[in-house]
Image (spheres, grey):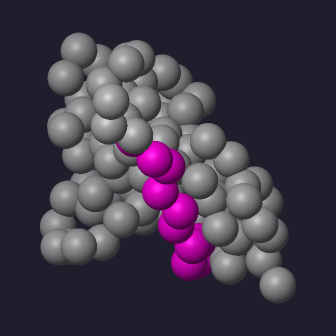
Amino acid sequence: MISKEALQVRVRGNSMAPLYLEGDILEVDPYAYERIAPQVGDKVLVEHPYRRNHLLVKEIRTVTPDKVFIRGINADESTDSRSFGMLSKNRLKGKIKGKVSGAR
């Protein structure tokens, strides 16, 4: 059986403050949505719809059969679905499992 390991990402910016701060390292399950459907409230790693190779950490606010509306907790500092609309679920790159280490 092939091991499906979690990814780690470092937070840049303040869109998810105070939950996740600049420099925090997060553990991401890239296979979560192969097993379960995305839920409102999930913290996720998602592809930016217009910036190639740019990932965002956000919270799911709305789920439809094929799309999600994502938003940062710190709305004043967030680029999210308010500016680019709902995203296809195929842009979800994983579910945030938790914080590995805090900002220094």
Provide residue 16's location: percent of width, then percent of height. 64, 59
Q: Quadrant of the C terminus?
A: bottom right
- Relative to the observer, which residue lies in front, 89 or 33? 33
Provide residue 94's location: percent of width, then percent of height. 41, 43
Residue sticking out furthest to the front: 1
From the image, give the main secondary structure of the stretch colored magenta: loop
Residue 80 appears in the picture as rendered? yes
Q: Image point 40% across, 17% down: which residue?
A: 36
- Relative to the observer, which residue lies in front, 24 or 83? 24
Q: Is residue 37 magenta?
A: no
Q: Is residue 78 above or below residue 66?
A: below
97 horizontally vs 31: left or right: right
- Relative to the observer, which residue lies in front, 100 or 64? 100
Image quarter for residue 4? Answer: top left
Image quarter for residue 96? Answer: top right
Q: Image point 52% across, 24% down: which residue?
A: 40
12 horizontally vs 70: left or right: right
Provide residue 5's location: percent of width, then percent of height. 46, 47
Magenta region: which residues?
A: 4-13
Q: Is residue 79 above or below residue 59?
A: below
Q: Image point 61% across, 42% down: which residue?
A: 97
